[in-house]
Amino acid sequence: MRILSSQVSKHVGDEVTLAGWLHRVRPLKSVTFAVLRDRDGLVQVVAADPELVTRLADLPEETVVEVVGTATANVQAPGGVEITSPSVRALSEPALTPPFDLYRPVVTAALPTVLDNAAVALRHPRLRAPFEITAASVAGFRRALERLDFTEVHTPKVVSSATESGANVFALDWFGRKAYLAQSPQFYKQTMVGVFERVYEVGPVFRAEPHDTARHLAQYTSLDAEMGFVTDHRDVMAVVREAVADMVASVAERASAAVDLLGVRLPDVPREIPAIHFADAQELLARETGEDPRGEPDLAPAHERWLCEWALREHGSEFLFVTGYPMVKRPFYTHPEPGRPEYSNSFDLLFRGLELVTGGQRLHRHSDYLAALEARGESPGPYAGYLAAFAHGMPPHGGFALGLERFVARLTGADNIRWTTLFPRDLHRLAP
């Protein structure tokens, strides 16, 4: 029966069977060292038999092989155990040469080379590690939302109208009718509040925004949640805090080897994340930075970075909520701030200098939706199915969306979100 590299130390003295990829072959004068890689790590194989040494010399790295041998303690071997007296059987045809050396501890290839050859490049332990962190992050998100009695849903990704009332959508032909790739599950998750009260989803979203930057993608994975019977957006912010805390904890629990390999410094998530109103943030920036962003409807990236530095300095937190964004920068379904209708009951969560989460309280009265669409000069016709839910009674509710790839990029310190995206899709890339 096959065992994994991580289990070899439990079988010292036993004959064991392993299988994986030939990570490296290193011939010496009287012996050849081969390194086998499987999903759990690496194990050293020592070949002294002349016939096997010759065969290994003919097997290219990345060939899939089965190794049967004795697990032998050796303090100089990786993990303190190696495989001696082995037999090696190829399970695939000899592999083609990888685009760069996968056995080297650092990645020697540039990002375009990695992306063009992702199917092989991602086998490198350092390139694979972010996606172990990704998997752990999603597990933590689900754990938090399940603990808070949310129900997971799966909504359509082809829709008949633009979710955010914007132009940045991918249009497609749906059996002769105009349709779009969903910019978010927003309409559906709100509708499902009327069914389950609390729902969440993990799925792809599509944005045809012509940004060619290190932080933007045309397709990314969104972690969404929506909840009913809220008092205002602060109830939603409390759930965001729980979700992010569980995501960080899950990474520590489930992806510790990847965290160690990449030297990731996991953040502390405070019991109460500090918050600042958008108007106060602008006043603070004007007073402290020598710039005057007052009157601008959004925060510039440099201002997000400065505010995160301020939050760390003043509150000891790498996370900061900015609340009350101007209504002109929020979707039509956003609830205005009572007493200051030019501002909204909304928020962004900033983390290490970058916006990570967007959310807020939604409108919940049918008449308010009709008024909001009319104010924007839009007809309610394209939104008939969505508006029907509100005509049949919906509770005060709110929700949020968190970009998964952006979260992992912030955790790992990646300088480009494409390092933490499987097969990224952007302005220029549609393959592999």
Image (cartoon, rainbow, N blue to C red):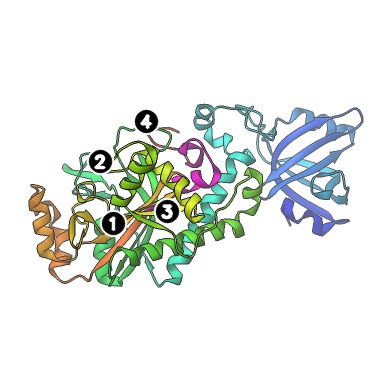
Q: Position of residue 283 (x, y in %)?
A: 31, 47
Q: Residue 51 in the image: x percent, y percent?
A: 86, 33
Residue placed under numbered mark 1 in the picture: 346
Q: CA distance from mark 4 to mark 1?
A: 27 Å
The numbered disc on residue 320 is 3
Tell me the amino acid under the disc marked 4.
Asp
- Spatial CA distance of label 3 from label 2 is 20 Å
Residue occupying image coordinates x 55% and y 50%:
133
User: Within 10 angstroms of label 1, few (less than 14), some, or many (20 or more) residues?
Assistant: many
Residue tagged by mark 2? 296
- Identify which residue is drawn at 88% across, 47% down: 74
Q: Classify the position of the N terminus by image quarter.
A: bottom right
For mark 4, does the 10 Å Cα neighbourhood hold few (<14), some (14 to 19), or many (20 or more) residues?
Answer: few
92 with respect to 394 (left or right):
right
- 3 and 1 marks in contact (CB < 8 Å): no
Identify the secondary structure beneath mark 2: loop
Judging from the image, what secondary structure is the residue with disc 3 in?
strand
| Callout 1 amino acid | Ser
Q: Is residue 86 left or right of residue 298?
A: right
Which of 20/210 is in front? 210
Q: Which residue is mark 4?
A: 212
Q: Nearer the viewer, residue 322 or 213?
A: 322
Is most of the magenta stretch helix, strand or loop?
helix
Look at discs 4 and 1 and give the one toward the viewer.
1
